[in-house]
Amino acid sequence: NFISSKDYTELMRITSPFHITVETLAHLMTTMEKHCQMGLEPNTNSSSDLKMLPTYVTNLPTRKEQGDILALDLGGTNFRTLLVKLHPNNEPQVISEAHIVPDSKKLLANDLFEFIVDVLKQFMIRNQLDLEQEYVLGFTFSFACEQIALNKGKFLTPSKGWVLSDLIGQDVVQVLQRIIYQKQLKVKITALINDTVGTLMACAYHENTCRVGVILGTGTNACYFEDINKIHTISDRAVLPTEATEMIINTEWGALGEGGCLDMLITNFDREIDRISNNPGIHIFEKLISGMYMGRLAAEVLASLINQGIILKTQRDHKQSYRYYGPFHALYMLQTSHISEIELDTGHTFANTRNVLKKLGLDYATNTDCAIISYTCRLISRRAAMLTAAAIAVLMKRLHENKQVAMKKICIGIDGSLYRFHPRFNMVIQRHLKILAPVLLNYELRISADGSGIGAAICAITANDAR
Ligand code: ADP
């Protein structure tokens, strides 16, 4: 592929800030470790970027859990209703439906919850559940909540583009439970969990070495089992089982960088993504990584390459197509799923890349254009996966140093479309964990498909049985 040395120099100038080294990752790890520690201490908690929220989940699944349990899973792009049938030592049977709430992200919580409960009722009727019978429900609510018990959580901050302003400071369970009872359903919410916790618990149901849960979808976050004596922010120890030695901590790692600790990594393109987001200055780490932002980030870089005359020159010169689409406008339709498609290309025909560009109305890409576009996407997704690896390594290090894992292996449960469908994410994480994770600790990354809802059901029935 031909590229002039001037264009090459310019391409490198624009894209080089996305190259990060292992030294940078090591530095990031040290910073994140400090924030983890501060987040667990009451006197430094407020100066930490990481909320390190206690979840009140203290036990792994036993596989003795039993019953027909309902679950609601809300917080990403769609919401799900689930009926999870647990039988001791058997595979869970799961009936799950995804629902789209029109303009859901703009709704206030009260309207949203009313809609959800109506859908839940229809779901119960469709699945022939007796509406006169009592059911327990686990609620996966994937936003930061300050919990004081497994079934009590004050909503802290919206993220991932959601508004929910009427819910801030309120107990999420109380609000939803009131609407459930108003609508005459005998459904009791016994557990409020985060999607990372659900992912960990559902993974641990199959693999008892699982101690970390990670989400890589619209947003990103992770949780892990912490030594209970090292968590100094538990507001009420009396509600804990007396034998509890560990508790899952929801790190809310997407917020890292809010105090400026990631500034050495932030490019001008990241600054632009943050500026145009509906929560500028917030959830910086998430904006470097997750699916909600990656497509737009790539579009910003590619627009800059067009601006400098490095790519899509033919497209720009093609008057008719330019009039209808304009290369800049078209590129902003680029989605994170398109990045996966582009990176699936093998060989030099760039069939997928051309296909994506065609979908965006860009029909005049040369092979050189495709090569540069593909290279740019790879740089951006690679940086995201490297940062994820460093963050996972921090949690593994903590588990290792706490020595609460007697075994030599840790399983990490992961869910989210970015991880599941991007062709290289897993490989880049694995490669960097080899360098960054504690030497003596083996690890396995496991997809915990739809784990967030199943995990909620496991937590809900465990909590109900303990009452
Ligand atoms: P949630 O919204 O609950 O996180 P998902 O895990 O399905 O649900 O994540 C959806 C996000 O994943 C989308 O917003 C999109 O950014 C990203 N995504 C969807 N499909 C793909 C794909 N094929 N490759 C990479 N990312 C994808």
Image: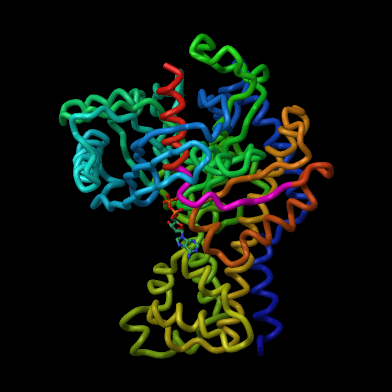
Furthest residue toward top: 238
Q: Residue at x 20, y 26 (%)?
A: 181
Question: Which quadrant is home to the C terminus?
Answer: top left
Q: Is residue 64 above or below residue 329?
A: above
Question: From where the camera sits, is residue 93 visible?
Answer: yes
Percent across and percent down for residue 187 are 27, 29
Query: Percent position (x, y) of residue 117?
Result: 23, 37
Of residues 183 and 366, the one nearer the viewer is: 183
Which residue is located at x 23 percent, y 52 percent? Answer: 102
Closer-to-camera residue (391/303): 391
- The reply, left or right, for residue 363 in relation to residue 116 is right
Please check the rendered image and state whether residue 441 is part of the magenta-colored stretch, yes or no.
Answer: no
Nearest the camera: 98 or 13?
98
- Residue 460: quarter of image: top left
Coloration mode? rainbow
The residue lying toward the viewer, choosing from 83 and 302, is 83
Say above or below: 424 vs 286: below
Above or below: residue 343 compared with residue 283:
below
> Could you tell whether 438 is left or right of 264 in the image?
right
Ligand 1's quadrant: bottom left
Give the magenta part as a residue range: 443-452
Q: Give the quarter of the image for residue 372.
A: bottom right
Return the residue found at the far right: 440
Q: Give the image location of residue 95, x and y in percent.
A: 35, 49
| Quadrant for the N terminus in the image | bottom right
**Residue 445 sits inside the magenta stretch:** yes
Coordinates of residue 386 in the picture (x, y in percent): 67, 54
Figure disc tally:
0
Q: Can residue 257 be seen here?
A: no
Tell me: 448 left or right of 389: left
Q: Residue at x 52, y 85 (%)?
A: 351
Q: Say if 361 sits above or below 122 in the image.
A: below
